[in-house]
Amino acid sequence: MDYKYIEQLLERYWLGETTLQEESILKAFFSQDNVPAALGRYRSLFCYEQQQTATDTLGDDFDERLLQITGETATKAPAATITQRLMPLFKAAAVIAIFLTLGNAAQRAFEAPEDDSSSVAAVEQTIEQGRSVALSDSIKADTLTKAALQESVIVK
């Protein structure tokens, strides 16, 4: 029997040019019982995966035996609440909100006023309101002081 195709696939395999389908053909070929002696040396390479999956499994009692050897007891990890799971998301949202707020404040601080006359008038109006409040407060204080002085004079 001629095994030229298999030899070509092997050459391409060593060069790293085979596809997954061609590698599965090689695995199927070498998993047969009657492999030619010339190609028999490659059999263990392609059959290794099938042989090892059958023998390399852990038993159901592996964890228990390991815990007995180390002298520890089995503990379960505490369950994380939904708040704990979402905490990184909350923190990220807070940081983004802070950056947006600071960016908006910085943008307004460096923005030139559009109408200087209206802003000047608004400032002057605020100053006048402040003066009138201060003036009315001082008048009330003077009146109370004057009334207190008059009462003290009358009492004496």
Image: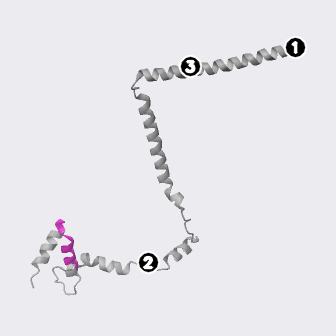
Q: Residues within 10 Å of mark 3 (few under 14, many from 20)?
A: few
Label 3, secondary structure: give it.
helix
Q: Is residue 3 above or below residue 120?
A: below
Q: Quadrant of residue 19?
A: bottom left
Residue 31 point in image, percent of width and height: 24, 82
Q: Are marks 2 and 1 in contact (CB under 8 Å)?
A: no
Q: Residue at x 84, y 16 (%)?
A: 151
Residue behind mark 2: 58
| Cα gap from disc 3 to disc 2, whole angstroms | 87 Å
Q: Amino acid at mark 1?
A: Ile
Q: Residues within 10 Å of mark 1 (few under 14, many from 20)?
A: few
Q: Are marks 3 and 2 in contact (CB under 8 Å)?
A: no
Q: Look at the image and give the residue range highlighted in magenta.
A: 14-27
Q: Amino acid at mark 2?
A: Leu
Label tally = 3
Q: Nearer the viewer, residue 62 or 19?
A: 19
Residue behind mark 3: 128
Q: Amino acid at mark 3?
A: Glu
Q: Quadrant of the C terminus?
A: top right
Residue 130 point in image, percent of width and height: 59, 21
Q: Residue at x 61, y 19 (%)?
A: 132
Residue behind mark 1: 154
Q: Nearer the viewer, mark 2 or mark 1?
A: 1
In the figure, is residue 89 to the left or right of 38? Answer: right
Label 1, secondary structure: give it.
helix
Q: Quadrant of the N terminus?
A: bottom left
Q: Nearer the viewer, residue 13 or 37?
A: 13
